[in-house]
Image: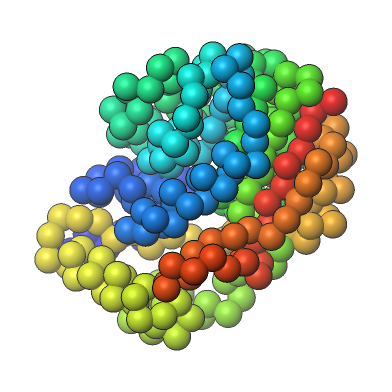
Amino acid sequence: MPIIKCKSHIDVYEYRTKSKDPHELSGRGLNKQLTQFISRNILNEISLTDTDTLVDIGCGDGTLIQLIDKQLTQIIGISPSKAEADRVRPLVEEIPNTTIEEGLAQQTNLPSNIANVVICNGVFIYLSGVEVDDAFKELIRISKDNSIIYIGETPSIDEYADKKFGDSILLWLWWTLKNQGVNSFFRRVKQTLTALLSKEPLVIAPKDLFFATPENFIAQAKKYGLHLEKHFQHSELNPEGEVVKNPTRWNYIFSKK
């Protein structure tokens, strides 16, 4: 019965490397369509050229890297653990000039002034307050002048405020049915049964998540020298496959001047 309670979000993704489907590293369960939709939206917001070096921090299962439709000077995916980096490398090994390295948003282990484009989607949500400050400093450090920095899926409120299921699987399934619909509910039931009857892990993540209003997040970024180019509500797909705005998550595009 591999139902695992993790103490940190890094541990969550390390356990997910043991999943049969590497898409679990995206943090979106079995919803590959959603991951592709979000990744394409990010790439549509960024004008890439063949002279760019792109760094994708928290690159998940490499979906965004696989969707880049031109050959760049360099693509670097950052995974938070050795196990995750090892799992992702074979998924992108045929993409020219691409490497997957172990690192964190607050410590990428990359050289300074290396990137023209930095993508950090769905990562800040897992950081503590101090780590957010360190991440801003690190994004500035690895970016060249006039680079673009995309920070996505950052909550504006505490998204766990109404999720009182704690570590209870049954309460989690009931919450999913009420709030995410029948399709999501049955996907989670299937995931739970698979974990109970096989070696496929079901990971229970910590409930501490970073959040900040757009006003506060923009002010914090500005303090570290980032210039806001654009911010907008995050778009995703509902269980019926329709495009909807997420009421609590925001995307930000900054530049380093």
Q: Position of residue 166 (x, y in %)?
A: 46, 74
**Is 88 on the left-hand or right-hand side of 129?**
left
Residue 6 visible to the viewer: no
Residue 221's place in the image compared with 29, above or below, is above
Q: Position of residue 167 (x, y in %)?
A: 40, 72
Q: Position of residue 159 (x, y in %)?
A: 60, 69
Q: Could you tell me how many numbered marks the image carries?
A: 0
- 22 or 14: nearer the viewer: 22
Q: Position of residue 117 (x, y in %)?
A: 64, 28
Residue under the image location 61 percent in, 27 percent down? 48
Colour style of the rendered protein structure: rainbow
**Is 215 on the left-hand or right-hand side of 195?**
right
**Is 19 on the left-hand or right-hand side of 150?**
left
Where residue 114 sits, quadrant-wise, is top right
Residue 90's place in the image compared with 190, above or below, is above
Q: Residue furthest left?
A: 197
Quarter of the C terminus within the rendering: top right
Residue under the image location 48 percent in, 60 percent down? 206
Residue 166 visible to the viewer: yes
Residue 148's place in the image compared with 200, above or below, is above
Quarter of the N terminus within the rendering: bottom left
Where residue 222 sits, quadrant-wise, is top right
Residue under the image location 23 percent in, 70 percent down? 190
Residue under the image location 54 percent in, 61 percent down? 236
